[in-house]
Structure formats: C-alpha cells, structure tokens
Image: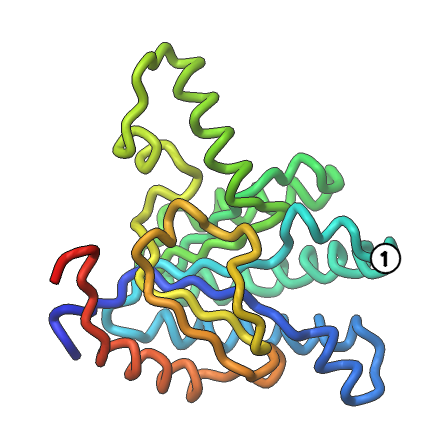
Amino acid sequence: MSKNTPLRHLAIIMDGNGRWAKQKGLNRTKGHEEGAKVIHDITEYCVNHPTIETVTFYAFSTENWKRPKIEIEFLMKLLDKYLQNELLLFQEKNVAFKAIGDIKAFSKPLQQRIYDVQEQTKNNTKLTYVLALNYGGRAEIADTVNRLIAQGKTTISEKDISSALQTPYSDVDLLIRTSGEMRLSNFLLWQLSYSELYFTQTLWPDFNAAELDEIIQHYHQRKRRFGGL
C-alpha cells in the first residue's frame, strides 16, 4: 500500500439500478432490490478493510423526487426494510450508521426508523457508514454557512465550513461512480475537492467486492499531490 494514498474515506455513487433491470426485462424496482443487496456486501468489505474508516453511499438525491411517484414510494419502503434488516449487521460488525440530507421530507415512520438506527449504533467504532438521503451538496454548503451566520460568525473560513458540515469525518479520498456516467451529480461537493475519482462501466447491481478491491489497488498506484508537485 502506498504511503501517499491511504484510504480512509470511500464514497460511492450507486448508479445503474434502473438500466440493469431494463436490460433484463424487469421492473425498475427489481434493480433497486438487487442494488440494496450490493450495499450490504460492500459494507462488509469496508468493515474488513484495514484502513477504511468511513464509507458514504449516495442513496437518494434532492433531484430524485422527479422520478415517478410509484418508484419513490417503493424506494421509501425498501429503505425502511433495508435499515431494519441491516441493524443486525451494524451491531455485529461494530458499525455506526449516520444519515445525511434533509430527512424531514420523509414520512414520520421512516424518519423514526432512521433516528432509531442512528441512536442504536452511535457508539460503534469500527466503521462509520453514511447514507446520503434527500441530499444535495450545494444545499449542504448553503445550510452550513447559514448555521454559522446564525451562530454569530461574521467571517467564515474554510475550516469553519469543514467542521460544521453534516459529514465532518474527513475529506473523501476516493469516489467511485458506477454505470459509466462521469459526473458528480451534486454529491459531497465540498468534501470531494481533492478526491481521486474512478468511473466504472459496471451497473450497480453487478458491482461486487472483487471489483472494489481492484479499484482500490488502482487507487494506491496514484500519487496524490493536493495541488503540489
């Protein structure tokens, strides 16, 4: 492992569930179901990785509300079921769950599920698992600045913003996006300033721990300069 490229914070844009289902002649919801299984497998990989401290998954963006109502309703039910099932994994593997984004837009029962899982896992220390829900990077930055102003800050530094974000764990070291799309889609815009980016053609339901391991090995071959030489 290169000393220049330690991997502490991994972020993933999980893309391609709908296209995966379409290619197989299935309903889009089947793609989301299969995608949820992949999150479980990748979480287990991250728990066992020697240096990863935080993994952040982009699950539902502020723009995803534009999707058909029936698909959104399915996603909300799937999220509730997923969190209920994954709580056992979080507790067994010493994983702390954290949601970022404006979850007040969700139903009261789903909000309660999210809060309950966060509360029950808050003292776990092996891995911080972050799920971005109704999340937008620009909104996070704007909300952070407004909170700092409300606290009486008249001059706001980069350090102030970094420490007050919803994700003050660390900047992202490596961002992976599946499905061949090469854009950030308003995800962790502040935290990705000096991240290494990797785009794979693999659709999310076909992604697995073996490919993740290959990507991480590729990441360790890179030399991160952070603006220097």
What percent of the width, then of the height, locates residue 196?
33, 66
Rendered image quadrant of residue 15: bottom right
Residue at the image point whose x is 47% and y is 52% from the top: 97
Residue at the image point whose x is 49% and y is 42% from the top: 119
On screen, residue 1 versus residue 92, left or right, reads left
On screen, residue 213 versus residue 20, left or right, reads left
What percent of the width, then of the height, locates residue 161?
34, 32
Q: How is the image coloured?
A: rainbow
Nearer to the camera, 45 or 148 = 148
Count of numbered circles on the image: 1
- Up-down: is 159 above or below 49? above
Q: Quadrant of the N terminus?
A: bottom left
- Up-down: is 152 above or below 186? above
Q: Which residue is mark 1?
A: 68
What percent of the width, then of the height, locates residue 194?
30, 56
What percent of the width, then of the height, locates residue 102?
61, 38
Nearer to the camera, 10 or 63 = 63
Rendered image quadrant of residue 59: bottom right
On screen, residue 157 versus residue 17, left or right, reads left
Label 1: few (<14), some (14–19) or many (≥20) C-alpha neighbours in 10 Å: few
Nearer to the camera, 38 or 228 = 228
